[in-house]
Image: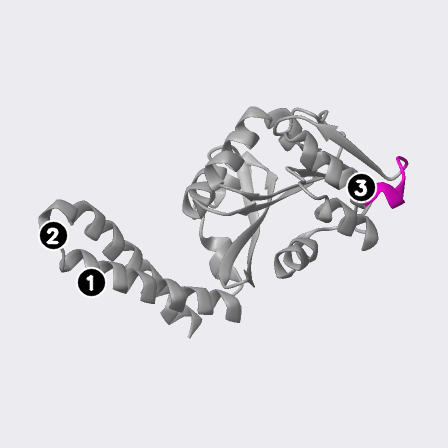
Amino acid sequence: MERLEKILSLSDPVDTMADIGTDHGFVPYTFLKEKKANFAIATDISAPSLEKAKALCSSWGSEKIQCRLGDGLAPLKPGECQAIVIAGMGGNLIYTILQEGMEIAKSCKYLILQPMQAVDFLRENLEDLGFYIEKEDMAYERGKYYHIFKVFYNPGLCKENQDPYRAFLKDKSPIKKAWIDYEIKRLENLSSFIKKAQDPSRQEEKLEEVEKKLLKLREWLDEFC
C-alpha cells in the first residue's frame, strides 16, 4: 500500500500517535509494527469499523493501543498524542475536523493529512487555521494519485510563507511530474469538451477556471523539466 508507506515515510517516531477514522486499523497497527510509535489511539465514528480495528490490533494488547468511539478529534485530549493521522477523507471534512478540534490539533508535534477530494481547498485553507505545510508528497495506488501533507501548528511561519504550493514545488519528484502530466491531459480534455458544448457561453466561468489551472500546471511542468 503505497499511501501507507508514504504516510510512514513522512512520520517521525513519537511516543503516542492517533489515527482518526481508523476503519480497519491498518495505520495504527503499522505505526506500532514499524516502531513509529510506542502507543497508538485508533478512533472512528462507526462502532462496526472500530470492532474491525480491535480485531486487527488485538495482538498488541491494551498497553500498546486503545480503540475509541467518537467523531473527529473529540475522543482525544490536548497533549495526549504527538502525531495525528487523518487519511482517506475529503479535504472539506478534514478541514472541519481540524477547525472543531483546534486545541487538540495545535498540541501535536505534527499531523499527516491525506485528502481524497478537495485537495486544493485543504491546501489553500490549512494556513488560515495556522497549520504550516512542512512537506507534501504523493502516492500512486490502484490507478489514482493521492496528495499527502505533513503539517504543524505555527501561525507565524504561515504569515512568513504565504504560498500554499511551496511544499509541493520544493521536492520535484518523478511522481509529482507524472501527476502534473496527468492533470494537464485531463484538463485539456475538459477544456475541449466545454468548448464543443452546444452553448459554451454558459460554461464561461468553468472554462476560465480550467484554463487558469492549466496555465499554472504548465508553469510547474517547466520547473520540473
Residue pointed to by mark 3: 55
Label 2, residues with CA under 10 Å away: few <14, some 14-19, many ≥20 = some
Label 3, residues with CA under 10 Å away: few <14, some 14-19, many ≥20 = few
- Three-letter code for the amino acid on which mark 3 is drawn: Ala
Q: Is residue 138 left or right of residue 30?
A: left
Residue furthest front in the image: 48
Label 1, residues with CA under 10 Å away: few <14, some 14-19, many ≥20 = few
Q: Give the magenta-colored segment's residue range.
A: 57-63
Mark 1 touches mark 3? (CB < 8 Å): no
The relative height of residue 189 versus residue 8 in the rendered view (above or below) is below
> Residue 72 bears which disc, if any?
none
Secondary structure at numbered mark 1: helix
Q: Nearer the viewer, mark 2 or mark 3?
A: 3
Residue pointed to by mark 2: 200
Identify which residue, 158 or 133, lies in the foreground. 133
- Three-letter code for the amino acid on which mark 2 is drawn: Pro
Earlier sequence position, callout 1 versus callout 2: 1
Q: What's the distance in space between the residues labelled 2 and 3, CA to CA?
A: 54 Å
- Look at 53% across and 37% down and name the residue there: 94
Secondary structure at numbered mark 3: helix
Q: What's the distance in space between the residues labelled 1 and 3, CA to CA?
A: 50 Å
Residue 152: where, in percent of width, then height?
A: 61, 41
Residue 217: where, in percent of width, then height?
A: 35, 62
